[in-house]
Image: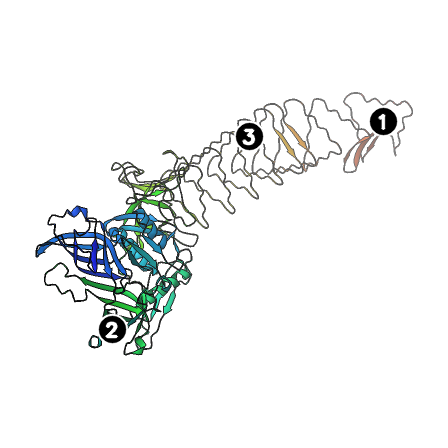
Amino acid sequence: MAATQSNSEVKIKTPLGPDVLLFRNMSMTEELGRLFTIDLTFLSEQEDINFEKILGENVTIELTLTSGAKRYFNGNVTSFSQTKGLDHYSSYKATVKPWLWFLTRTADCRIFQEMSVPDIVKSVFRDLGYTDFEDKLTSSYRTWDYCVQYRETDFNFVSRLLEQEGIYYYFTHDDGLHSLVLSDGDAAHSSLPSNAVVDYFPPDRRAVGKKDFISQWNFTKQVQPGKYQLNEFDFEKPKAKLETKSEIIQSHKTADYEIYDYPGEYTKTDDGDEYVQARIEELHCQYEQTEGQGTIREFTSGYKFTFKGYTREDQNREYLITSVTHNIHSHAHISGGGDNEDPYSNYFSVIESQTPFRAARITPKPIVQGSQTAIVVGPSGEEIYTDEYGRVKVQFHWDRYGESNENSSCWVRVAQIWAGKKWGGIHIPRIGQEVIVDFMEGDPDRPIITGRVYNADQMPPYDLPANKTQSGIKSRSSKNGTPANFNEIRMEDKKGSEELYIHAEKNHTNITENDRNEDVGHDRSLHVGHDKSEAVDNDKSITVGVNHSEAIGNNKQLSVGVNHSEQIGSNMTINVGSNLTETVGINYAETVGVAMELTIGATYVQSVGLSKTVTLGTSKSESIGTSKTVSIGSDQSEEVGANKSISIGENLDETIGDSHSEAVAKDYSLTAKTISMTAEDSITLTTGKASITMKKDGTINIVGKDITVKGSGKINAKASKNIIMKGKKILQN
């Protein structure tokens, strides 16, 4: 007759069919915030079970409670083995775990942005096709700008996030399925349906017929820190105080020790308050713990019960079950088995129900070992994509989900050569460039760009190794710049060809607040393609050791506000192709040490508005090929220290508007072939007391002492009227 489980208190249901596997033993451990594990031993009349038909499959263990109700333990087979047989049966063992365990079998590198931890966790579940979970969270959780799963299993990733936020989980079981319940407080826990109140019966007073009771109760208190403090730094609020504190002080003397930690992984104090509270509660739920043993088949982690009947009254209160180890065995199919033994017992841990539970943070966060490189990315059509802090977005090589655009990462800070308050160095990495990314404290959630590197797509600006002695900075015009559009500072260090090269693609502005000195050892050449303008607010001095040459294609204009002085050691030649005009507002002085020669090919005109003084140390010579005209608006004075000679080839005409006066200190000689003098009114010749006056009416007066009229020929006296002669005597021959 085939073996059957139909009348057993414990049954196993598998995809292999009814009674293919017969239940023998089970040990199960379930714990808040942890995976449950069921270790099963089976008997079977089949010695060649196909493992592939059960491995990974869902199985259910059915346990009959003392009330007659059924309790189920459900999970997936993660390990299956065949062991030494017993009697005429083959023996098999299986390990059963929740669907969440399968997340330990998949690892990834990916980025989550603008999501809370509950949303991230649910997304991971759904991506793998799991929907048997329930959200009983009551708190709100911050949105993570950037959260990275880096080289870790999906299970570790989910676990560490839940542990950090103070979220935990437990499982509920039904026939054919089990569900994960996300929890963060008392509201997620209800009392045991059939055992809301549980009695204590020690082993020596165990009640006959009383099957659901607690027989062992061991409670412990241990010293835990009573204070917790976290700290953080936010570069967007560098002066903000982000310390957060929380404390739960017990009454014993050593209850006020503090744990201080940094970084707290938050940027807002409200989030920090939540984290520090979760940390102190994590420690506090370990302060008082109780372990026990009993027979209550309904015990399940995540449920509550009220304990009564214990000798210490302070222990008779409500508790939350944090872990249970179930031990179930059956001898139904073994000859000589003890069928009168209770097939069920358990070991459990509880905490007082008003103590918030927080799972210990045992899942390590991955640490990025060393630096990585990434490619700078941004929106399509952009060449430079940055924010007000000079941050950029990157595509990591390990990110298989990123699309190499502005959504590939968070904004990543860029280390610069210098960073001050509105001063320092700035070089923004451009889209397509490869950058070196480090991670603050190795945290994949906190990348920072520390450098840039060339690759086969982004080659150095100078051909190497041919130009290995060149170094410098070469930029590219944006947008749509080509290799011909750049600014550059380049240094050539090749011995004998050293050069500092500066190229401005368009404008070059140089501002010196105080002094600027340039020392050029040999030649200097300056070429200006269009205009050049210089403005010197004070003095300007130019010293030329040998020659100074200027060539001006068109006009030259020089404006001097006060004085203009030129000193020439030897000769000065000015060659004016057309006209030369000099305008002097007041005085004009020329000093010639030896000789001055002025040659005018055609006309020379001088116009003096007021006075003109010419002083010659020795001689002045003027040679005029044709005419010379001097026009003086007012007075002209000439002073000659010695002699003055005027030689006129033909005529001399003088026209005087008013009077003409000549004073000769010694002799005055006038020689002419013919002398003609005409006066409008009179002419007077005077020397001493003698004078001759001729008037326009014809009167002539000769006045003197002795007057002699002598003629070598005749003297004729003729008058139209009388001739009058008077004297003391009138002598005649």
Q: Is residue 201 above or below residue 526?
A: below
- Classify the position of the C terminus by image quarter: top right
Nearer the camera: disc 2 or disc 3: 2
Q: In 3D space, how far apart are the residues under numbered discs 1 and 2 (Cα atoms)?
A: 171 Å
* Left or right of 559, for residue 135: left
Amino acid carrying mark 2 in the image: Trp
For residue 585, what is the image quadrant? top right
Nearer the camera: disc 3 or disc 1: 3
For residue 666, what is the image quadrant? top right
Q: In 3D space, how far apart are the residues under numbered discs 3 and 1 (Cα atoms)?
A: 51 Å
> In the image shown, does 726 or 259 lie closer to the viewer?
259
Q: In 3D space, how far apart are the residues under numbered discs 2 and 3 (Cα atoms)?
A: 132 Å
Q: Position of residue 577 (x, y in %)?
A: 53, 26
- How many marks do you count on the picture? 3
* Left or right of 28, for residue 144: right
Q: Is the residue marked by circle 3 packed among few (<14), some (14-19), or many (20+) residues within 10 Å?
A: few
Q: Is the residue marked by circle 2 packed among few (<14), some (14-19), or many (20+) residues within 10 Å?
A: some
The disc, 1 or 2, on the residue closer to the chain's N-terminal end is 2
Tag of residue 655: none
Q: Is the residue marked by circle 1 packed among few (<14), some (14-19), or many (20+) residues within 10 Å?
A: few
The disc, 2 or 3, on the residue closer to the chain's N-terminal end is 2
Q: Position of residue 575 (x, y in %)?
A: 51, 29
Nearer the camera: disc 1 or disc 2: 2
Q: Is residue 359 above or below residue 407?
A: below
> In the image shown, does 78 or 121 lie closer to the viewer?
78
Q: Which residue is mark 3?
A: 598
Q: Which residue is mark 2?
A: 217
Amino acid carrying mark 3 in the image: Leu
The residue positioned 20% from the left and 75% from the top of the image is 203
Marks 3/1 in contact by CB < 8 Å: the verdict is no
Q: Position of residue 619 (x, y in %)?
A: 56, 34
